[in-house]
Amino acid sequence: MTKGFALTTPLYYVNALPHIGSAYPTMAADAVARYYRLRGVPVRFVTGTDEHGLKIERRALERGLSPKAHSDEIASGFEQLWQLLSIHYDRFIRTTDPRHKPIVREFFERCWQAGDIYKGRYSGLYCVDCEEFKRPDDLYTDEKTGQSFCKIHSKPVREQDEENYIFALSRYQERLERYYDEHPYFIQPDFRSHEVRNFVAQGLEDFSISRANVEWGLPLPVDPSQTIYVWFDALIGYITALLEPDDEPTLENALARWWPIDLHIVGKDILRFHAIYWPAMLMSAELPLPGCIFGHGFLTRDGKKMGKAAGNVIDPDALARQYGTDAVRYYFLKEIEFGRDNDFSEERFRAILNADLANDLGNLLNRTVNMVARYCGGVVPSVVIEPSDPLREQAAGLPALCAEHWESLRFSEAAAAVLYLVRSGNKYLDTQAPWALFKKGEQAQVEQVLYAVLESVRIAAVLLSPLIPALAAEIYRQLGFADRVWENLTWEAAQWGGLPPDQPLRPGAPLFARLD
Ligand SMILES: [Zn+2]
């Protein structure tokens, strides 16, 4: 059996309920997982929550809850949102899962045996929100008070100086650089790879992997007076997640079937942890490295940074309830080039949905199904479409083109290519004018045109299904297919000619109602 395709979202920090910053990469990962399943590839799609650390300890205290009770509540908020957004993950790992602890211990021991962990004094400026010691470049200073602030969080960092256990990251500088050279796709997109490489070229510093004064964490195996640094434990969560439910929690079992992960999707703010710390930790533990770390961009709203204080956060839950799950999935994956920063405005959101889903895709389906009812007795015409037919010609190259886009995480381009076929279908109807042909009694021509258009819509549904699973299923339903045909759909269905002649259509409500 081939290994299949394993991918992860970040394990989200449970300091707060999910927001668009976590929904966005999760929708992307779900679309990729759906694409590979459609290809018949076994998929292991991992998401979950990262629940230890000082920030969680403090947040729970503020709320008058134990860290565990706080984490339970937030983790279930994530699971609920994923359900609403049609996220079909295979594993939801929580780093407070008791099975995570022995895996972290084993991993730690491998690094310890390798001589890569030593005890020493560690001092620096710490951002609790990042859970990270910051470099001077990552900070700005208030000139009046001399206080330094984290650039990401605009919050004061604090001086921390304690006896810690330290991971010898600097030892891995050359090996990492060589690895990046030999694996040009390891960090994507390319411009993010350059950012990471520039950072590494400045010289890597060892980093502390334990905390003396944080209780909410896993105990350090060699010194239980300290807890393991939250990032060290969280990254290993990707491995724990691969255990089968009945497995003994050993590293060997966790790695047996799905390791190495093929794709980690992460935000650009945590790219360094995944593209530098994580591969170095894996090298130290003598484990294979993941295939690709993809760093996506940040979203702003109406040109401004989103924040609670500004009151301009995008609430994915509210958006999905108002506009529908597929509308949200479609907009964020189609309209934003994956990897780049981008801006969200509700006006643009509505305009895109109206243009693509209501006017182009929805309209093409609904007008064609109605014409078939009027001119062809409501059943798929029984005709042969020549390979030279313009729609058939255009559709022929699409599966291969889309596959390339999907596999490179170019969601926008995959969707745009399909929408191009849909627009051609609408134009074809306008120029062929089956209503006029019908009046002239040219029934054979009418049937040719309508079949070609129906078939284009069907192919569009297959190719867009990783993005908009519910709308694609509804297209199949209106085209008269039984549910089980949809449930057993494969990528091969995107080949021309899948619409059975004489199949009765099921005209229904407009696929996507225009937003006014
Ligand atoms: Zn910060």
Image: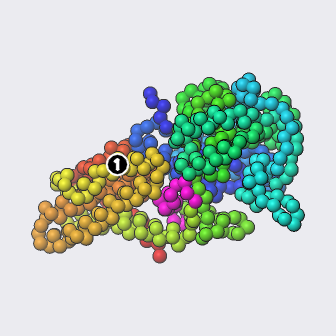
Q: What residue is shown at x 36% (from left), y 50% (from top)?
A: 401
In this rendered view, identify the residue nearer to me: 157 or 378.
157
Q: What residue is shown at x 66% (from left), y 43% (from top)?
A: 201
In this rendered view, identify the residue nearer to me: 429 or 387.
387
Give the x, y percent position of residue 38.
Answer: 41, 43
Q: What residue is shown at x 83% (from left), y 47% (from top)?
A: 124
Q: Is residue 110 visible?
A: yes
Q: Give the magenta-colored segment's residue range.
A: 321-341
In the image, farthest residue toward the front = 202
Mark 1 closeness class: few <14, some 14–19, many ≥20 residues within 10 Å: many
Q: Is residue 49 visible?
A: no
Q: Quadrant of residue 430?
A: bottom left
Write down the residue under mark 1.
Answer: 399
In the image, farthest residue toward the bottom = 516
Q: What residue is shown at x 74% (from left), y 54% (from top)?
A: 138
Viewed as shown, does residue 209 lie left or right of 17? right
Dominant secondary structure, magenta: helix
Residue 117 painted magenta: no
Which quarter of the rendering shows the N terminus?
top left
Above or below, comparing residue 438 to residue 395 in the picture: below
Give the x, y percent position of residue 8.
Answer: 57, 43
Q: Quadrant of residue 455?
A: bottom left
Amino acid under disc 1: Pro
Residue 339 painted magenta: yes
In this rendered view, identify the residue nearer to me: 495 or 500.
495
Q: Secondary structure at mark 1?
A: helix
